[in-house]
Amino acid sequence: MSGQHPPIDCADFKAILAALGLQKRKRKKQTSGSHEDWVGVVNGKWRKVTVDCPKAPFTGFLLDSMARQAGVTRKKIYEIYFGLH
C-alpha cells in the first residue's frame, strides 16, 4: 500500500464516521459480536456502516466497502483522516 493511503485503525475510522455525522447505534440486547453499527444521514441519505474492529487496520476492499456504506468515496475518507492527523 502506498504512503498516500496508509491503513486506518479502528479508533481513527470511528472518528471519521463521527466527522461525517454518524453515531454508534446502541444494541437492543446484549450480544457477544464484535460488529458495531454506525448510523445517520450523510449527504441527505440515511446510512448504516458496519464496523468490525478485529479486522482493523482497514485497507483496500474493506475500506472501500465501508466508504460505500457511508455514501462517500475513499478519497473523502482520507481527506478526513489526514485532517485528524
Image (cartoon, rainbow, N blue to C red):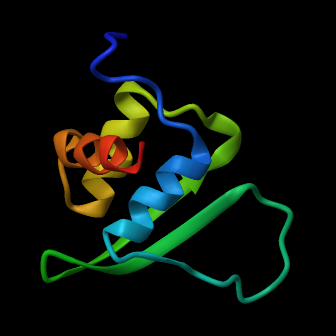
Q: Residue shown at 36%/67% (left/top)? A: 19
For the C terminus, which image quadrant?
A: top left
| Left or right of 47 in this view: 22 | right
Image: 51 above or below 5: below
The answer to which quarter of the image holds residue 60 is top left
Give x and y (percent) for residue 78. 28, 40
Of 6 and 68, the residue lying toward us: 6
Give x and y (percent) for residue 28. 72, 89
| Left or right of 26 in this view: 46 | left
Of 11 and 68, the residue lying toward us: 11
Q: Residue shown at 34%/77% (left/top)? A: 21
The answer to which quarter of the image holds residue 48 is bottom left
Q: Residue shown at 48%/50% (left/top)? A: 13
Image: 72 above or below 5: below
Residue found at the very far left of the displayed protein: 44
Total tally of numbered discs in the picture = 0
Give x and y (percent) for residue 56. 61, 35
Residue found at the very far top of the displayed protein: 2
Give x and y (percent) for residue 33. 78, 59
For the N terminus, which image quadrant?
A: top left
| Left or right of 53 in this view: 40 | left
